Amino acid sequence: MLKNKKLIGSFALSATLIGCNLSVNGVLEISSTLTFVKKTIFGSKTITVDRGRQNATVEISDKKVSLQIRDSAGKNQNVDFKVPAGNIPTDGTWIRVPAAQTGQPYDVVTSVLKQVEADNEVHRDWESCTYERCTTHCRGSGDNRDCYRECRTYRGEKRVEYRLVYTDWNIKFRLHDNAQVAKFQGERQDVTRDYLHVGPCR
């Protein structure tokens, strides 16, 4: 997905960790029926997912990885894995967390690849903003003079110059027992602005 853009910091990868919430859509390919354990307010229950290709979402937060599977009927099944997700490197390195730690009957094998690039083109635009104006009002005179400030917020615009920054994520997620039983791959691109100049709001 990254092309005709300026590379930032040699992929901004090597020592970088995820360190934030990340949600990526993709496809889960299931080679044999999956069985998961899900905790509810009434206790634990068993969830089974049949083999095949399913639309799915992997959500990575500080302390866990969640897998949301959407079956052919449009029903969502949510499964949590105890994975130290905040410590997953973003250079594509594979990590493996055994079933004894994940809280599910499967090892989790996953990799996260993050690439950050900036567009060379400088964009100039106006952005909406708010600013505040204050006035002082006084009543009376001499020792009886009473003053107060009144401030109002107004909507305005400011002139900005920026480059677009593209962050591409590639997530690979595998489930293993004695062999690989499911695999997921998903991609996501985030676009942000790297501001070179921000004018006053007026």
Image (cartoon, rainbow, N blue to C red):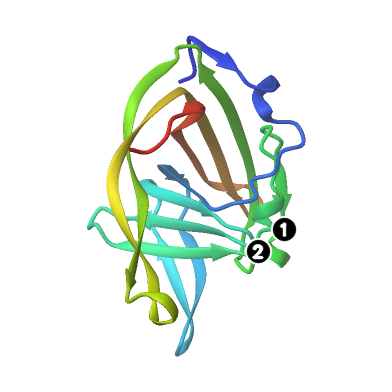
Packing grade of label 1 (10 A; few <14, some 14-19, many >=20) is some
Assign the C terminus to one quadrant of the image.
Answer: top left
Q: Residue furthest left?
A: 73
Kindly indicate the quadrant of the structure image that contains residue 173.
top right
Judging depth in this view, the residue of 164 and 167 nearest the camera is 164
> Where residue 31 sits: x, y (%)?
47, 46
Q: Which mark is residue 32?
A: none
User: Residue 53 appears in which quarter of the rendering?
Assistant: top left
Q: Residues within 10 Å of mark 2 (few under 14, many from 20)?
A: some
The percent coordinates of residue 135 (x first, y second) are: 35, 58
Question: Which is more toward the observer, 119 or 153?
Answer: 153
Q: Where 55 sits versus 137, above or below? A: above
Vertical order, 166 against 31 (above or below)? above
Whether residue 20 is visible here, answered yes or no, is: yes
As helix, strand or loop, the secondary structure at mark 2 comes to helix
Q: Which residue is mark 2?
A: 102
- Label 1: which residue? 98
Disc 1, SS: loop
Task: Please tell me whether residue 200 is drawn above or below residue 7 in the rendered image.
Answer: below
User: Taking 155 as reference, is 22 left or right?
Assistant: right
* Residue that extends furthest to the top in the rendered view of this protein: 4
Name the residue rendered at 54%, 39% in the picture: 171
Q: Amino acid at mark 1?
A: Pro
Relative horizontal placement of residue 162, taking residue 64 as reference (left or right): left
Quadrant in which the N terminus is drawn: top left
At x 40%, y 60%, the residue is 49
Q: Percent position (x, y) of residue 94?
A: 70, 39
Name the residue at 69% across, 30% down.
Answer: 13
Residue 109 position within the rendered picture, expressed as x and y whole percent measured from the top left = 65, 47
- Assess whether mark 2 and mark 1 are in contact (beta carbons under 8 angstroms): yes
Name the outermost residue toward the front.
142
